[in-house]
Image: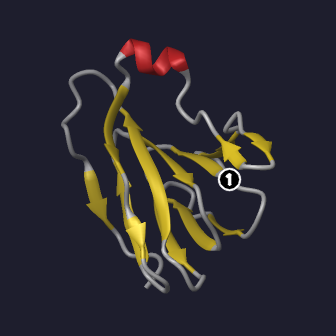
Amino acid sequence: MEGLEFLDTNKHSDRRGWVAWPIPEKMLQSGEIHNIHVPLLKPGAIRGNHYHSNTTEYVLVQSEPCSALFKNRTTGEQQESALNGGGPFLIKISPDIIHAFKNTGNSDIVLICFEERPPGSPESDCIRQVILP
């Protein structure tokens, strides 16, 4: 779907588990990263149901299972993604893509989110729009 990308997390796995580097060093050094936040979703909980007018949001889904729903406000196209194994998943969500995440498992899951926005943009451009009730 236009405006939505699943990115490489540069994950390394071994017998202990995995480690991922979701934020490129260039972005860290340039100061392009804003508003790092860590939502926790209880079983059955939904987070998101919003879009941003100027901000690109990155979401690292580091535990599963989780379902995600995305809708392009311009084209009306929708995409549902079941994130059930093979994670972590790093998702780049462009402006005007409505997004929501639902914990479909029996344990808490944690997301790590960060934003990239043009200089001079308002600090918050989060606009609520429910697509996953």
In-front residue for pair 77/48: 48
What residue did someone put label 1 on?
1
Estimate the x, y position of residue 25 in percent, counting from the top left. Answer: 53, 18
Name the residue rendered at 63%, 69% in the picture. 64
Left-right relation of 120 to 58: left
What percent of the width, then of the height, locates residue 88?
66, 52
Coordinates of residue 41 in the picture (x, y in percent): 43, 73
Image vertical order of residue 130 relative to residue 7, above or below:
below
In the visual, does 128 lie left or right of 89?
A: left
Q: Residue at x 21, y 45 (%)?
A: 124
- In the image, residue 79 above or below residue 97: below
From the viewer's side, name the closer residue of 14 and 66. 14
Q: Nearer the viewer, residue 127 or 22?
A: 22
Residue 31, by quadrant, is top left
* 39 left or right, relative to 84: left
How dense is the environment of label 1, judged by Cα within 10 Å: few (below 14), some, or many (20 and up)?
Answer: few
